[in-house]
Image (cartoon, helix red, strand yellow):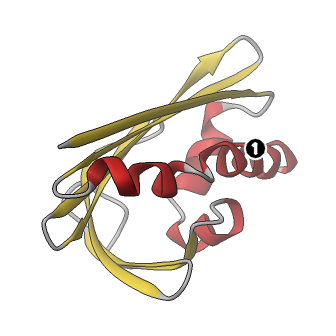
Amino acid sequence: MTFEHEESATTTAPPAAVWALWSDVGSWHAWDPAVEAVALEGRFAEGAAGTMTLAGGIEVPFTLEVVEPGARYLDRLTMGELVIEIDHVVRADGDGAAVTVRTTISGPGAADIGPMVTRDAPVALERLAALAERG
């Protein structure tokens, strides 16, 4: 079973400001209400792994599957047989940036857990844009 969700937003901030927040895992809790903390082993690069502590204290291993500096990253969280892939893309749009986050969840119960996982996506994008605009 697979669940998919896409959320998009625009911001007056340049793509580099969005990327600066994305590539700083220590800032993720500031803009994503689903995240309490992130520990990454090594630098923000393809293949790097770490642990994400989700709201409620749930620790989940994750891996950066794709990193295209300044433009895109995809992280994969694994919870038993459940796999959550979150693809983050930023591109220039007029005087600012367009941001798209696509979540794909596969495995048992994906359709049930999907809405819970993506519930805060609009809030996360709003906070991300506001922080990026403040620089």
Where is the N terminus found, in terms of image quarters?
top left
**Residue 113 placement: quadrant:** bottom left
Residue type at numbered disc 1: Glu
Q: Position of residue 124 (x, y in %)?
A: 66, 51
Q: Position of residue 74 (x, y in %)?
A: 33, 46
Outermost residue toward the left?
A: 81
Q: Is residue 33 visible?
A: yes
Q: Position of residue 10 (x, y in %)?
A: 71, 25
Left or right of 104? Residue 127 is right
Q: How many marks?
A: 1
Q: Residue at x 20, y 62 (%)?
A: 82
Q: Residue at x 75, y 44 (%)?
A: 126
Q: Is residue 41 visible?
A: no
Left or right of 93? Residue 43 is left
Q: Where 57 sits versus 15, above or below?
A: below
The residue that disc 1 covers is 126
Q: Residue at x 66, y 25 (%)?
A: 97
Q: Where 135 sits versus 47, above or below?
A: above
Q: Secondary structure at mark 1?
A: helix
**Residue 40 placement: quadrant:** bottom left
Quick one: 90 or 110, which is closer to the camera? 110
Quick one: 101 or 90, which is closer to the camera? 101
